[in-house]
Amino acid sequence: MTEQTHNPANGADKKPLVATLVIAPFAQTYFNELRRQHFPPERNFLEAHLTLFHALPDDPRIFEDLEKLAKEQQPFEVTAQNIVSLGNGTAFKIISAELPKVHKTLQNSWSDVLTNQDRQKRNFHITIQNKVDSAVAKKLQAELTPTFQPFSFAVTGIHLWRYEGGPWTYLATVLFGG
């Protein structure tokens, strides 16, 4: 199933597309709340997200390939394994046997159009704090780590967004399982 609010194929806007994964509502709420509390408000344009690709071309092929993948891909579980340092921020490391497979499948399909960043192996994570002094980040990590317990949640599809130099504009959601 694809839900689309904007047709990127019209050629009117060629800003890059960002692909993020659709995560279970309880996990989305949890990460959003932490992000709201700890991300610098003047820089917090987005909800918490699990990025699949950072800068895809605005091309109908991207949508077509996602829809094809979604028909064959079933929802799967991922685990928030631990809290990690981003130097000047804090994130949750996300692991799953299925996650790198989905990424690699799309990477292979789009190898001719990917940026260097998107060609690399992904270190999947959800950022709840970024662009703060490293001491502030270390303090948050020290506060969260003692009580953190790894937990699993479902990934059910892919969201596509248009990067707008800070904020993102929602374009479509492709749900797994046809």
Image (spheres, rainbow, N blue to C red):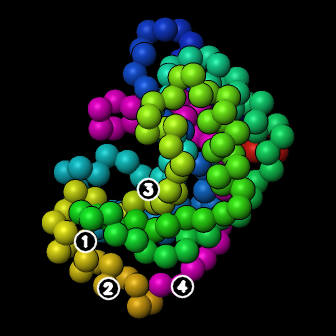
Mark 3, secondary structure of its residue = loop
Q: Which mark is residue 143?
A: 2
Q: Which portion, as a residue range, is magenta?
A: 148-173
Distance between mark 4 and mark 1 Cα atoms: 19 Å
Dot 1 and dot 2 residues touching (CB under 8 Å):
no
Say which amino acid is labelled 1: Ala
Say which amino acid is labelled 2: Glu
Distance between mark 2 and mark 3 Cα atoms: 19 Å
Dot 4 and dot 3 residues touching (CB under 8 Å):
no
Viewport quadrant of the C terminus: top right
Mark 4, secondary structure of its residue = loop
* Image position of 134 (left or right of 98): left
Is residue 29 in sight in this rendering? no
First in residue order: circle 4 vs circle 3: 3
Q: Which mark is residue 137?
A: 1
Q: Which mark is residue 48?
A: 3
Q: Which x, y percent locates residue 130?
A: 28, 59
Say which amino acid is labelled 4: Gln
Magenta span main SS? strand
Q: Which x, y percent locates residue 142?
A: 31, 85
First in residue order: circle 1 vs circle 2: 1
First in residue order: circle 3 vs circle 1: 3
First in residue order: circle 4 vs circle 1: 1
Mark 2, secondary structure of its residue = helix
First in residue order: circle 2 vs circle 4: 2
Q: Which mark is residue 34?
A: none
Find out whether residue 98 is within the magenta segment: no
